[in-house]
Image (spheres, helix red, strand yellow):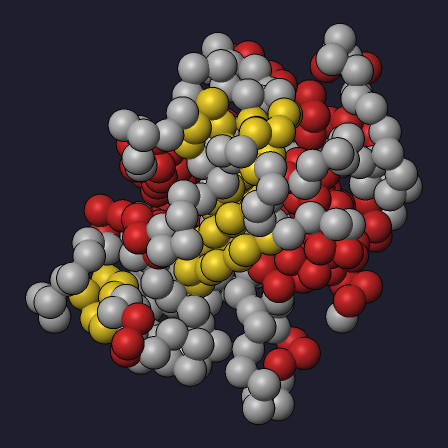
Amino acid sequence: MATFFHMLLPGLLALLLPHVAVRSLATGELADIPEDLEDDECTATAGDGDYCALVALQRRSLRSSGRTSPAVAEDSEGGIDRKTGAYHIPKDRPLKILFVGNSFTYGPPPADREDKRTLNNLPRFFKLIAESLGDEVMQEEDTIGGCTLQMHRPSYNPEACGDPEMCQPIDLPRVNSSSRCTIPSGIRLRPTYSPCPQKLMRQEDGAWDVIVLQEQSYLPTMQAARDVMYHSTVEEFAAVTNSLESHVRRHRPLIALYMTWPYLNGNPGRRPGRTEMGCWPVGSPLHLAHLSGGARKWSAKINSAPCQGYALAQGAASGLQHGGDVVVPAGFAWLVARGSPEIPSSC
């Protein structure tokens, strides 16, 4: 299991930890990506080419939105400088990071669960790897298995909600009733979840430096779903976090868009179908696939692992034009680790 996450995390570590340059996901060694790199110098082949392609994709998205990649510096106050856009690593204190997502993120499970080895443990692994490199981390999570980021939005999860038609209180092994957390009504809860959308605004241990947003595993591959759910959600997180303590803090949290990985063999023959109850409030996946060109066209986009990875990368990177600051290329790390073939032109 540790090997699994060592393959998964280099992109996140490269973007968020101090004194670490851009890491080559193919070799694990430090590699500087030149700022004057032209998009046509990147290829879609396995190895460095996959990472290079994402760098180019991220730059194109940033350029089209009139922004640049955040520079990195150290400061007593972490986060993104509201005026210059530079990212500041917190100095002389832990990095405070909030992970928002689903089962691609959540963990650790309760110690007495028999299936604890089958569950992801991203926040904890991130902390352990960071601290092994000499960097302190204070991590929290807000996770609901199988759900979309839409259901974590601040506007869906007001503090002290007492209306049972709007919200349901949380009392689970990992988040008990004393936490006073709620989520929207209608979502089925399981013991492995760790849901508390109110953590975003509470900032009980001080202002967040980084907020990682991990979308449902195939939503970013649907254009209509991106338009009506993903983009507006990233925009809301960006707007809300930009306003947090803006009267006393020069910086705001960095919004990191976490690109998930394709399934081992893609999704051959899959059609949009069953979803977690209450997690798709603005339309079913089948309806959104129809609006994106039809279920058959969507299935062709995710038929193989390379095509699915390419679609996920495009979807994740589109959030850079809606308030995201960086893409965390975990999906490409997986493709490189597997020795993925070239991305077909048909994708």
Q: Quadrant of the N terminus?
A: bottom right
Q: Quadrant of the C terminus?
A: top right
Q: Is residue 344 left or right of residue 189?
A: right
Q: Is residue 330 left or right of residue 193?
A: right
- The residue that appears at 53% across and 33% down in the rendered structure is 76
Q: Position of residue 24 (x, y in %)?
A: 83, 36
- The residue that appears at 18% across and 65% down in the rendered structure is 167
Splitting the image into 4 quarters, where does residue 226 fall?
Answer: top left
- The residue that appears at 28% across and 78% down in the rendered structure is 177
Q: Is residue 229 left or right of residue 307?
A: left
Of residues 1 and 307, the one drawn nearer to the viewer in this rendering: 1
Q: Is residue 138 placed above or below 223 in the rendered structure?
A: below
The answer to whether one can see residue 321 in this image is no
Label count reads 0
Q: Position of residue 4 (x, y in %)?
A: 76, 62
- The residue that appears at 44% across and 44% down in the rendered structure is 208
Of residues 12 and 291, the one drawn nearer to the viewer in this rendering: 12
Of residues 7 and 91, the one drawn nearer to the viewer in this rendering: 91
Splitting the image into 4 quarters, where does residue 189 fall?
Answer: bottom left
The answer to whether one can see residue 103 in this image is yes
Q: Position of residue 103 (x, y in %)?
A: 53, 65
Q: Is residue 32 left or right of residue 259?
A: right
Q: Position of residue 275 (x, y in %)?
A: 40, 64
Q: Is residue 11 placed above or below 48 in the rendered structure?
A: below
